Image (tube, rainbow, N blue to C red):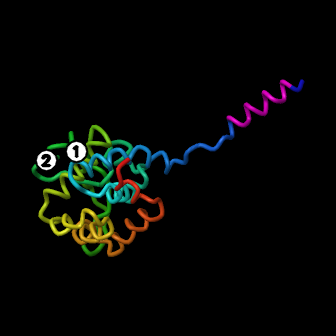
Amino acid sequence: MRAAIVTLCLALTVLWAPTASADEQYLALAEPAARAVAAEFGVPASVAAAQSILESGWGRSALAVDDRNYFGFKCKTSGHGPIAIGCREYPTTECDPECLPAVAIFRVYASMTDSFRDYGRHLTTSPYYADALPFAADPDAFITEVAKRYATDPEYAAKVIRLMKTYDLYRMDSPA
């Protein structure tokens, strides 16, 4: 009887043992991609991870789940670019200045890594973000410069910085 109780207790411990939260699981997947972007393009890994969280809702958005698009990149009239593998239409809301329902065409990626690589390529090759590049060693200053062209939300940089601080994403900017 005692052995049965011990076995039952062990089984219950396994069943109710704490597991990593969905957010922690997302970070475990995003961190290697963010670090790879830092190594290849010089974009702070902390910024890449935080922007992906904000843009994809911790990887739960339809764009992220279905098409591995973690940054909300749209296809251009010239196509999907050198890294994405295609384009797909999604209903969205476009604001200019009034917000209205719309359909937009977003990039599709083969993997999370490809989405992050396209993000790094975009930030380092577009003249829009040239003013951010000298701040690669200062993630807060980097995102402050990027946000001036990346988003229309005046609080965008503050939101990204809050994510970096809350989840200690700055640790990603140090060697693993």
Q: Is residue 13 magenta?
A: yes
Residue at the (27%, 37%) spot, across then down? 110
Instruction: Say if 83 sits above or below 171 in the image.
Output: above
Asked if marks 1 and 2 touch (Cβ < 8 Å), the reply is yes
Instruction: Say if 67 sits above or below 133 in the image.
Output: above
Instruction: Name the magenta segment's main secondary structure.
Output: helix
Q: Position of residue 5 (x, y in %)?
A: 84, 29
Q: Secondary structure at mark 2?
A: loop
User: Callout 2, which amino acid?
Assistant: Gly
Q: Position of residue 146 (x, y in %)?
A: 24, 67
Q: Position of residue 151 (x, y in %)?
A: 28, 67
Q: Position of residue 135 (x, y in %)?
A: 23, 67
Residue at the (89%, 24%) spot, across then down? 1
Q: For label 2, count other residues whose C-alpha is less than 10 Å away and answer few (under 14), some (14-19) or many (20+).
A: few
Residue 160 position by quadrant: bottom left
Q: Which label was assigned to residue 87?
A: 1
Residue at the (41%, 58%) spot, across then down? 169
Q: First in sequence: mark 1 or mark 2?
A: 2
Q: Is residue 122 left or right of residue 54?
A: left
Instruction: Say if 145 sits above or below 106 in the image.
Output: below
Q: For label 1, count other residues whose C-alpha is less than 10 Å away and answer few (under 14), some (14-19) or many (20+).
A: many
* Identity of the residue furthest to the right in this view: 1
User: Callout 1, which amino acid?
Assistant: Cys
Marks 1/2: CA distance? 8 Å
Instruction: Say if 165 sits above or below 113 in the image.
Output: below
Q: Is residue 81 left or right of residue 101?
A: left
Write down the residue under mark 2.
79
Q: Is residue 145 left or right of residue 5?
A: left
* Identity of the residue furthest to the left in this view: 78
- Which residues make up the magenta segment? 3-14
Q: Nearer the viewer, residue 132 or 60?
A: 132
Q: Secondary structure at mark 1?
A: strand
